[in-house]
Image: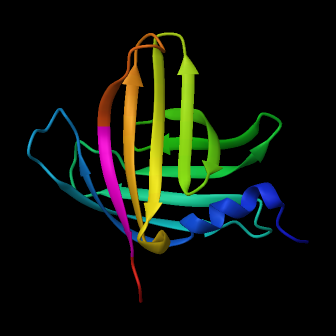
Amino acid sequence: MSQPANLQPLNALVGEWTSEATHPAFPGLVVAGRATAVWLEGERFLLQRTQADHPEFPDALWVLGETDEGLVSHYFDSRGVHRVYSLGFDDGVWRMWLEEPGFSQRFTGTFDDGGERIVGVWELSPDGSNWERDLESTFFRRRT
């Protein structure tokens, strides 16, 4: 069974990564972390785990793939939070977004260095119109 074409951009995430993150609630603090992404057998869903070396930053499991709603990313974290984001890839840019009354969130991750680095920015909006920068993270592909 071959992988559907619309899932092939997710291959860019496969592997082991280190990360650095900053958050406006912790000015001047850079939090180290790591991420791994592997295909579930059948290559229809990508499993991504993220961990941060700070107790205020949750560890998370992401399940990325296609459902009846299109390309999505299910998010589960160590706080018990679960969210479902829409997902897209365009010209080296990874996007995820969530639009809910009172809480909208979006992520833009730009691949550079030949896919060896992802520079990402999360933004929040209480009304879906006015956006504020939130978590910023950079992922560096680990080479073994």
Q: Residue at x 74, y 58 (%)?
A: 7
> Residue 106: within the magenta?
no
102, 131: nearer the viewer: 131
Which residue is drawn at the image coordinates 51% and 52% (left, top)? 61
* Residue 32 percent across, percent down from the top left: 23, 61
Q: Residue furthest right?
A: 1
Q: Is residue 16 above or below residue 132?
A: below
Residue in view at x 55 percent, y 43 percent: 95
Q: Quadrant of the C terminus?
A: bottom left
Residue 21 percent location from the top left of the image? 26, 51
The residue shown at (59%, 35%) is 85
Give residue 89's position: percent from left, percent from top. 63, 50
Numbered label tally: 0
How far from the left and from the top, in percent, is residue 104?
A: 48, 21
Task: Check the image and report above or below for 116 versus 57.
Answer: below
Quarter assignment of residue 18: bottom left
Residue 80: image quadrant is: top left
The magenta segment: 135-141
- Horizontally, residue 136 falls left or right of residue 25, namely right
- Where on the picture, by quarter, is residue 4? bottom right
